[in-house]
Image (cartoon, rainbow, N blue to C red):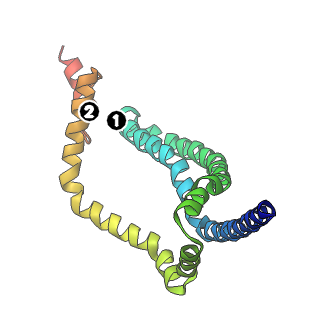
Amino acid sequence: MKNVWVFALLALAGSAQADTSAAKKELVAKVLQLQQPAIEQAARTLAERPALLVLQQAGQALQSRVAADKREAIAKEIQADTKKYLDEAVPLVRERAIKLAPATVGVLLEERFSEEELKQLIAILESPINRKYSEMGGEMHKGLIEKLVAETKAAVEPKMRALEQSVTKRLGLPMAPAPGASGAARPAKAASK
């Protein structure tokens, strides 16, 4: 008879735990739903990063290796290629991030937050003040970055050029002509031979 009562108590405790777990899973799902814009933005940033690097390298190559009269046309072609990449890659990465979130972020939320903490987190995420602050995030970031670039560009650009020259030299690559260097000196030099 004792065994029956112990078994019944264990079964009752197990079902209570399952109910708690189901409630907690619902709370985690709600947090993930509220965080979906941030998850999508992280995915977008991840997909865009390689394209930005390619564009940066292409911009440098356009200036140093492409004739001035061909730059605009090639730049437009590169922009079209980049747009095609982004149109394909961003939705792919975004959809995958949304699918992975429950198994990654969701698991961490379940492990590290109690139900009460999840309820509090949801209240914070749903608060009008948090929404207002979150909506300002891009604007605040953009403002800071623009000001930072403006104030540090003159100091950082020479250091970046020195680094590029050092790396180019160490790799044994031909040095790119200095910006603004005219190709007119070359023909005159060749004519004097």
Q: Residue at x 23, y 37 (%)?
A: 163
Q: Which of the 4 quarters of the picture holds residue 81? A: top right
Which image quadrant: the N terminus? bottom right
Residue 157 as seen in the image, left or right of residue 94: left
Q: Name the spot of residue 156 as percent of width and height, x first.
A: 22, 51
Left or right, 2 with respect to 184, comes to right
Q: Relative to 104, does residue 137 appear above or below in the rendering? A: below
Where is residue 138 shown, x and y percent of the image? 46, 69
Q: Earlier in the sequence, mark 2 or mark 1?
A: 1
Q: Amino acid at mark 1?
A: Ser
Left or right side of 179 for 94? right
Q: Kindly state the secondary structure of the residue where label 2 is placed.
A: loop
Along the viewing direction, whichever of 167 and 35 lies nearer the viewer: 35
Residue drawn at 55 percent across, 48 percent down: 47
Horizontal and vertical percent for residue 28?
63, 67
Label 1 element class: helix
Q: Residues within 10 Å of mark 1 (few under 14, many from 20)?
A: some
Where residue 179 appears, as percent x and y from the top left, is 26, 41
Quadrant location of residue 98?
Answer: bottom right
The relative height of residue 37 versus residue 177 in the rendered view (above or below) is below
Residue labelled with disc 2: 177
Quadrant of the frame with the C terminus: top left
Question: How would you rate the neighbour count of disc 2 (Cα within 10 Å): few for under 14, some for 14-19, many for 20 or more?
Answer: few
Q: Which mark is residue 64?
A: 1
Q: In this picture, is 158 found above or below 186?
A: below
Residues at discs 2 and 1 in contact (Cβ within 8 Å): yes
Residue at position x 24%, y 56% in the image = 153
Residue in view at x 21 percent, y 31 percent: 166
Rounded to the nearest angstrom, the CA distance separating label 2 from label 1 is: 6 Å
Task: Give the residue type that dot 2 points to.
Answer: Pro
